[in-house]
Amino acid sequence: MKISIITINYNDAKGLERTISSVISSKTDNIEYLVIDGGSKDESVSIVNKYKEHIDFWVSEPDNGIYNAMNKGIKAASGDYIMFINSGDLITDHKKFKELLTVKYSEDIIYFNLEIANTTDNNRFIKTYPAIPDFKYFAEDSLSHTGTLIKKERLSEYGYYNEHLKIVADWAFYLDSILKNKCTYRYVDGCFARFYLGGLSSNPANLKKLWEEKSEHIKNNYPLFFTMYQDWMQKKAELYKLKSSITVRTARKLGLLKWLNDFSNFTQ
């Protein structure tokens, strides 16, 4: 089994060097490494040249957004599986990473837990994923592309990431592949990678666009679920406003609103 690790970068020389260092520390004979740079104006190309003997393929040229860059990497890759570790993100447990990859996988998508880190205060937590991701899960969340193995042929058959979607194309791929195209998948209860908040999908400024793209995709591809999805999201938004009010936060601390916590857990 050959794995292609792809790093996407644009004007993040410091994060790129950190990522390259972490990937090449785990590189083995059955791993190829590709770096796709969007024509950065900072020192990114110098960083790539510094480590070019460890990089199997790289390019620096303007692109049409992150999914266009990711598709470039997929098309240039020669591995059986694709894995993205984008600029700034890390492989943190090299021993566990190598152990996990000794398993002979056959599934189309293999996903692991992921360490999430906040760039502002460096707080971290381990995000775990469901063994069986259903429509309800994808309505609210997604699998990560960081540290997830995807068969290259499935991405190719899908038509690669939809570049008309600017924020949720990877979410749409997972949703369609698992629920509509019946791709096989496996959840592995292990963690070897760290994802830093601050990208497109995790930026609060892009939240409105994210939900607009999700809604449009569900409306066009899952019309029977669309009304239910709208009602669902509206109730969650109302609940969030209620939970965020100062009066409710104070009462909750005093233990006077246990029903609200119970209801919130029930709807998640």
Image: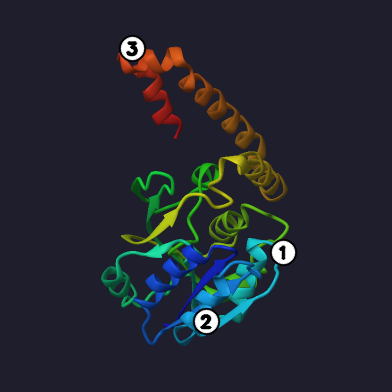
> What kind of element bears circle 3?
loop
Q: Which image quadrant is residue 234 in?
A: top right
Task: Mark 1 or mark 2: name the one nearer the start of the chain.
Answer: 2
Q: Residue at x 55, y 71 (%)?
A: 44
* Mark closer to the observer (3, 1): 1
Is 53 on the left or on the right of 259, as rendered?
A: right
User: Dividing the image into 4 quarters, which one contains the N terminus?
Assistant: bottom left
Mark 1 vs 2: CB contact within 8 A? no
Identity, as a three-letter code, of the amino acid under mark 1: Asn
Q: What residue did someone put label 1 on?
A: 64
**In front of the other: 147 or 235:** 147
Please give the name of the residue rendered at 43% of the width and 15% of the height, measured from the top-left corner: 248
Q: Position of residue 31 (x, y in %)?
A: 42, 82
Q: Nearer the viewer, mark 1 or mark 2?
A: 2
The spot of residue 251 in percent (x, y) is: 37, 12
Counting residues from the start of the chain, the first of labels 2 and 3 encountered is: 2
Whole-angstrom CA distance, mark 1 to mark 2, is 24 Å
Q: Which mark is residue 157?
A: none
Q: Which residue is mark 3?
A: 256
Vertical comparison of 131 with 108: above or below: above
Look at the numbered disc 2 and give the secondary structure of its residue: helix
Using the image as rendered, state which of residue 19 and residue 250 is in the foreground: 19
Report the side of 100 relative to 234 (left or right).
Answer: left
Q: Is residue 225 above or below residue 81?
A: above
Task: Determine the CA span between mark 3 and mark 1.
Answer: 51 Å
Helix or strand or loop: what does disc 1 sit on? loop
Q: Which residue is mark 2?
A: 49
Residue positioned 40% across, 20% down in the render: 260
Q: For residue 158, say whether it is visible.
A: no
Mark 3 / mark 1, whichever is N-terminal:
1
> Dividing the image into 4 quarters, which one contains the C terminus?
top left
Q: Are marks 3 and 1 in contact (CB under 8 Å)?
A: no
